[in-house]
């Protein structure tokens, strides 16, 4: 008797995911689908995230064929289709949930190499290796930055409007992922930003920076840039050749 009462109240959700969203489902489910039974009304955001998919990865939700937002309360049997950003569909364009044109980021503390690559390309990335989870979420939300992380719990905070879970653990692949996900190819401005502190670089006269240079650098180089934030001086030395090689590598992979 008791069991049948519970059965009457509960309802079933069938989740179908598109694009690469099955990445988040792991091996628990069949390819691209999950079934759940719920016993009380639940927001779509909570349903999606209980299956391991952060809301920041979902651009369109169709519930029984109708586009809904994350706050929609699921009360009965439902078929839910989830689409990631970038899956082109002319339908429901105005129902997309992720903003476009995001070009500023905050990265969590384990992503130093990715941060360096992105700054090398001139992309604005806030980064403090010592930042706590709460601070990262706050910076993302307050400054309208997309949170880059490999911690999917972080992306599940309601305050996180924009974010991205890096699929790869390889910094070069991560860089390509970010450039593609946020469509940054057309705004790249290499060597315009400080790799250490993210501030812009400006041309600097040799006399102004000579005190910061090693003796050989003073002799062999004449073009310098200085960071407007931390005053770090940059010139076309051996580190520059290495950075140029990295840039070439990124561009080659982005094109492929
Ligand atoms: Zn700097």
Image (cartoon, rainbow, N blue to C red):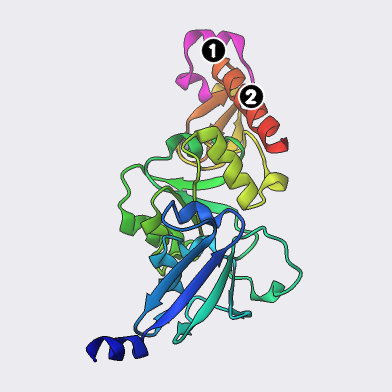
* Residue 251, placed above or below residue 19: above
* Residue under the image location 58 percent in, 35 percent down: 120
The dominant secondary structure in magenta is helix
* Disc on the earlier residue, 1 or 2: 1
> Which range is magenta?
208-223
Circles 1, 2 touching at the beta carbon (< 8 Å): no
State which quadrant residue 133 falls in: bottom left
Quadrant the C terminus occupies: top right
Does residue 236 appear in this view? no
State which quadrant residue 79 falls in: bottom right
Question: Between 199 and 152, which is closer to the camera in this rendering?
Answer: 152
* Residue under the image location 23 percent in, 89 percent down: 2
Front of the two marks 1 and 2 = 2
Is residue 210 located in the magenta-colored stretch of the structure? yes
Q: Residue furthest left?
A: 2
Crowd tier of the residue under label 2, counting other residues whose Cα lies within 10 Å: few below 14, some 14–19, many 20 or above: some
Is residue 230 located in the magenta-colored stretch of the structure? no
* Residue under the image location 31 percent in, 44 percent down: 130
Q: Mark 1 sits on what residue?
A: 217
Crowd tier of the residue under label 1, counting other residues whose Cα lies within 10 Å: few below 14, some 14–19, many 20 or above: some
* Residue 162, placed above or below residue 186: below
- Judged left or right of residue 130, residue 32 is right
Q: Mark 2 sits on what residue?
A: 244
Total numbered labels: 2
């Amino acid at each position: 008797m008791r069991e049948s009462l519970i059965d009457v109240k509960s309802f079933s959700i069938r989740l179908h995911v598109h694009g690469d969203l099955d990445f988040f489902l792991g091996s628990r489910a069949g390819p691209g689908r999950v079934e759940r039974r719920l016993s009380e009304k639940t927001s779509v955001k909570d349903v999606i995230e209980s299956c391991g998919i952060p809301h920041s990865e979902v651009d369109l939700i169709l519930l029984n064929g109708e586009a809904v937002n994350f706050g929609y309360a699921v009360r009965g049997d439902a078929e839910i289709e989830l689409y990631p950003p970038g899956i082109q569909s002319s339908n429901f364009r105005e129902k997309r949930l992720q903003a476009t044109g995001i070009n500023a980021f905050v990265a969590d503390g384990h992503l130093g190499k990715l941060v360096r690559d992105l700054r090398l390309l001139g992309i604005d990335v806030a980064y403090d290796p010592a930042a706590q989870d709460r601070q990262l979420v706050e910076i993302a939300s307050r400054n309208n930055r997309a949170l880059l992380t490999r911690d999917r719990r972080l992306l599940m905070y309601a305050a996180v409007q924009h974010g991205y879970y890096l699929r790869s653990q390889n910094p070069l692949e991560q860089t390509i992922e970010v450039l593609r996900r946020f469509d940054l190819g057309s705004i790249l401005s290499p060597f315009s930003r400080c790799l250490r502190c993210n501030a812009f670089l400006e041309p600097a006269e040799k006399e102004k920076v000579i005190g910061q240079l090693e003796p050989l650098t003073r002799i062999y180089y004449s073009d310098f840039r200085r960071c407007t934030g931390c005053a770090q001086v940059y010139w076309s030395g051996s580190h520059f050749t290495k950075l140029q090689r990295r840039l070439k590598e990124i561009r080659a992979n982005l094109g492929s």
